[in-house]
Image (cartoon, rainbow, N blue to C red):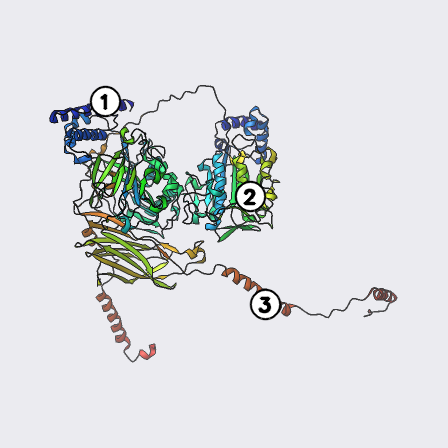
Amino acid sequence: MAAHRCCFPVWLFILCSFSLFIIAGSQETTVAPEQHASVLDNPQTAAETAEQTAGESGGVEERRWEGTEVRDAAAQKQAEPAVLQPTPQPKDDFQEELVVRPLHSGDIYASFQFRTLWETDFMRGNKVSHYRLFPKSLGQVISKFSVRELHISFTQGYWRTMQWGQPYLPSPPGAELWVWFQDSVTDVDATWKELTNVLSGIFCASLNFIDSTNTVQPSASFKPLGIGNVTDHRFLRYATLPREIVCTENLTPWKKLLPCGSKAGLAVLLKSEKLFHSSFHSQAVHIRPVCQDWQCKTTSWELRQTLNVVFDLHNSGQGKREWSLFKMFSRTLTEACPLASSSKIYIDITDNPEGEQFELSPATSLLSQAMVLGDRRTFSVYDLTQQDTFGSVRSLNLLIRWKSTEGDMLRPLLHAERYVAGYGLQTGEIHTLMYNHHPYRSFPVLLLDSVPWYLRLYIHTLTVTSKGKDNKPSYIHYQPSKDRVRPHLLEMLVQLPPNSVTEVTVQFERALLKWTEYTPDPNHGFYVGSSVISSLVPSTVAMDTNSTRERPLFSSFFPCKEESSYFVRVYTEPLLVNLPTPDFSMPYNVICLTCTVVAVGYGSLYNLLTRSFQIEEPSPGLAKRIANVIRKMRGFPGTMG
Amino acid sequence: QEFSCQIWGIFFLKKTFKGNLRNYWNFLPEGFINTQLFTRFLSRISQDSAGQFFSSGHTNNWAVLVCTSRFWFNYRHVANTLSVYRSVKRLGIPDSHIVLMLADDMACNHRNPKPATVFSHKNMELNVYGDDVEVDYRGYEVTVENFLRVLTGRLPPSTPRSKRLLSDDRSNILIYLTGHGGNGFLKFQDSEEISNVELADAFEQMWQKRRYNELLFIIDTCQGASMYERFYSPNLMALASSQVGEDSLSHQPDLAIGVHLMDRYTFYLLEFLEDIHPASKANMNDLFKVCPKSQCVSTPGHRTDLFLRDPGSVLITDFFGSVRKVEITTEAIDLTDPIKEVEERPANGDVHKEMHSYVDQLPVSEIIHQKPKQKDWHPPDGFILGLWTLILLVFFQTYGVKHLRHIF
């Protein structure tokens, strides 16, 4: 390992100078010698440096493009495969990145992504005992419970799609857990129960409340995100806990899973006091098998830790539209995680090509484009593995200063909302509204509703209407509930007509719970988890279907199969439903009253009936008693009264 | 027997130095050691030159810290518990040895003007929540049942380690409870309560299962002294914030947060503990003096009759900290046992190396043409109809219409 470390920079230096040589040869310009001096860690940065030199040597462009956009660099890469091949690849790899998207509402959206890739096999009785970057606690969970895919998220607050657009990674309020098991698991339910218990210990969360009453097996909504061919939904379990609290105690174990902890790299920004002082906070862990190379013949395990947060303008900006890393996180960056092969910050500047909306400082000349959520976005890139990113002060404090408040956000093509209608405590109606804002194209959505058993759905009242007409779903999967055993599961595939609102309504009846089944605060109400809407939304530009190409982490989560559309998942609000609650002090009142009635009424009557009454003679005085004794002794019978 | 005792005693010493006490017990058949024998051990050891190592008789420390109150206006109870958590963590008990139960989320409560903090002092001076708290039981999980299960160790097998009290007969346990109580009970979550008899029985069960060496019980609630008056198990020391018939009072009202931040007794307990450091020699008698009636308004009580040692010889850090005695050896230990690199197994995947691919996330046509679930076989309707016709025909053939009156 050490030898490999030592010879690596040498290789890179050779590569770098070789590419420079080619450029110099082809363009016949002199190159600034400082470019050689930068200390390089990995081939990617080498390539970027090559790009930079390419750009500078061209001397025309002020801004440079990174990644696959640059032809020259790609050509350089291809020219060198024979040199790169023999270097032994490390078996695991860690990348970190932060995406900042200024939102039109004035809020700011920050999304952290940490990805650990590990070429190993947890399955087939393989005992993995040596862990480097991958957290051992999760590795053991994967192998013990034969997990093929695990997705867990903890969210506080609701993502406001209409104000903020689509998030890079959607998640419902509360906790969400869905797991695909290997097909070797025989008793999936028992494994699932144990797994939730173990995860509740790892993440300090009440995941042990996941039981059969809130677990469902969706038949079509959740497909494996990793590679694999088995899609038998018997091995899938999905559960949400809409009332789960998310706070520092969940963040602490989450940070401990990172290779650098919160000691170095982007994770130093994760301070709970700032992260929870926000409009939206979501942290997640996704584990899945992914392709290792373009041929996709071998797999590696991917652990993706994401944290999304939306900061409120008025909370921390004092009304001024100005943002900096320090204002958001009360920290600045000084270094990348030393274990990371790539560490980057992306700032979305698509709406701000000439800097008329906001000003970014320090300015960077490195740009990148990515297909994300059906759109081509442009990002300013800060590479933390480069020393010159931090400047002379050795710390990076990004600053965004707004210039104008104008500008419209592109309306998201799909959004949904849900509410409970009706009055009284007996019946009600759930309304789910799904909006298609596309002017001329319809697209399919798959709606998943999991309703607890104590709301008894009247499935015959189910209606789906769009534009005032009945919209017949092309696929319905309904599993009725069983009291205290399992929830309702409703899945529907609906085609949303262009520019329309589709309304799904279903009536329900509220069940009476047993006395001990109520929560300690039943008057707060009971939560019903978010509906999940999975959809293939038409994209405005052709999507990148090549899954193996090097892409920023935030744009490579959902695999993309078609060019014309992209997959998106939207969560509605969770519902808060009041159930009829008894007067909990009533049993005590009844007991007290009954006891009183029994004691006073029946008791005295019983007393009267069972007692035998005798006339008691008054006890004689002392003198009379003495007289009686004397009389007895003298032989007179009887006593005196 | 006496002789064997001595031999085992020496062995015992050696084992303890390695910090592996449980092994010792495994050597002996169950029931061989009775407590009498055991105390004889201890006395023998304490006379030894290495006796100071065992002056307290414990090798590990545990803490169970419970806030039993729900709702925002009970902020002070969470702050109470967290301030004790902060102190024990500062004095060396790791998170894995602390079972922290908080019945409600105050730090990220929507009413908290400063999220992810819980303050114990006015003007937001001391954040007892910290940046690396680990809450083991929270919200609805804090119930009487779970509390008693943690104490007695009778938990479902899949319960994670962080939610268990994995103590043994060499453990000193600190149990801290706070909430709303009355004479002889403590409320949990405003919906159920634990009585002092139940609590005393739980401690007895712990003692019989050898789950503690010594136990310090502290309760901050109204009429707190009533909670420990039924205790009968040995090696228990108990403190309470108020006597029977007295209320425990709150302290530190904060205008910005809008609630009282602490209870009086725990506030002064925290002030006392803030001055304790791992090497301090403060003992239990100092703890008994915390919060006199002039400060507390209520009268704090304590009970030591079940405790075998003199409270004056018991250090605060015996319960609130995890102070380990360390012996430094100068002997060189050879650790160069070669670690064998596991041979990289050649990928036998050449045979089953099929091309993997990602799955369609929303395969519309596949979903639509999904085969409906096979129904159980049912005889065709025509068959059933025919069968009934046949039965009726045979009936009328046999009896005719005139016999119908016999039936009806």
Chain of the residue where label 2 is placed in the rendered structure: B
**Marks 3 and 2: same chain?**
no
Label 2, label 1: how far apart the Cα atoms are: 66 Å
Question: In the depicted view, which residue is nearer to us: A367 or A499?
Answer: A367
Mark closer to the observer (3, 1) = 1
Q: x, y percentage for residue A100? A: 28, 41
Mark 1: secondary structure:
helix
Discs 3, 1 touching: Cβ within 8 Å: no
Evaluate whether residue B100 shows in this view.
Answer: yes
Q: Quadrant of residue A266?
A: top left
Chain of the residue where label 3 is placed in the rendered structure: A
Q: Is residue B11 above or below residue A639?
A: above
Does residue A26 appear to the left or right of B364 in the view shown? left
Please rate how many residues cluster around mark 2, counting C-alpha atoms within 10 Å: few if below 14, some from 14 to 19, many from 20: many
> Mark 3 sits on what residue?
A602
> Mark 2 sits on what residue?
B265
Discs 3, 2 touching: Cβ within 8 Å: no
Number of disc labels: 3
> Mark 1 sits on what residue?
A10
Question: In the depicted view, which residue is nearer to us: A283 or B323?
Answer: A283
First of labels 3, 1 by sequence position: 1
Label 3, label 2: how far apart the Cα atoms are: 49 Å
In which quadrant will I find the C terminus of chain A? bottom right
In which quadrant will I find the N terminus of chain A? top left
Label 3, label 1: how far apart the Cα atoms are: 101 Å
Q: Quadrant of residue A618?
A: bottom right
Please rate how many residues cluster around mark 1, counting C-alpha atoms within 10 Å: few if below 14, some from 14 to 19, many from 20: few
